[in-house]
Image (spheres, rainbow, N blue to C red):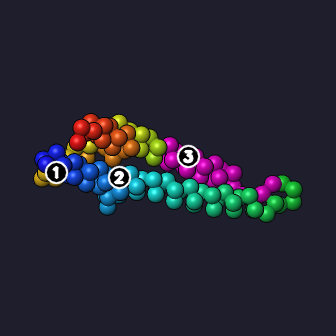
Amino acid sequence: MPELDMFKERRKWWLECFSGKDPHSIKWQITGMIQCEAVFRVIHEGWRIAPVTDGEGSQVNRMMSDLIIYGFLTGQMFAVRRLAEAGKLESNSDSHNRDVYSLISLLDDMQAHACL
């Protein structure tokens, strides 16, 4: 029976890491990536339909476009890196401390406690 209690406690912690209220939980990280993607697609569509001026190209400021593209890609790369970062999930009965909320750390912790 103590193993079942340990499993229940660990499972609760895993669910908290994946979809808890903490803004750094895995679910919120992925949600943030999706929101950025949606905003970028809206901006990109605006560029696509921007009017052309006297055969000189669209009225979109190229430097501003490059800055937005660079910022979007950089943000997405950092988000993927955070999700793939190796680290340890630490929990105890008093409080839950985390080193890293990432898919890798969550899967590593689940594997380490597979005996439960």
Dot 1 or dot 2, earlier in sequence: 1
- Marks 3, 2: nearer the viewer: 2
**Which image quadrant for residue 20?**
bottom left
Q: Quadrant of residue 52?
A: bottom right
Report the front residue among 27 and 55. 27
Which sits in the foreground, 45 or 86? 86
Percent across and percent down for residue 71 are: 54, 49
**Dot 1 corresponds to which residue?**
5
Q: Amino acid at mark 1?
A: Asp
Residue 60 falls inside the magenta stretch: yes
User: What residue type is disc 2 on?
Assistant: Phe
Query: Would you place residue 109 above or below residue 96 in this image?
Result: above
Q: Position of residue 18 (x, y in %)?
A: 35, 52
Q: Residue flagged by tag 3: what amino acid is it?
A: Leu
Determine which residue is flagged by label 2: 18
Please name which of the two marks, 1 or 2, marks the residue nearer to the observer: 1
SS at circle 1: helix
For disc 3, the marked residue is 73
User: Whole-Å distance between the Cαs marked 1 and 3?
Assistant: 44 Å
The image shows residue 76 at horizontal and vertical percentages of 51, 47
The residue at the point 60 percent across, 49 percent down is 69
Which residue extends farthest right? 55
Which SS class for mark 3?
A: helix
Q: Which residues are magenta?
A: 57-78
Residue 108 percent across, percent down from the top left: 32, 37
Residue 74: say if magenta. yes
Left or right, 13 with reference to 30 = left
In the rendered image, the vertical position of residue 45 relative to residue 5, given as above or below: below
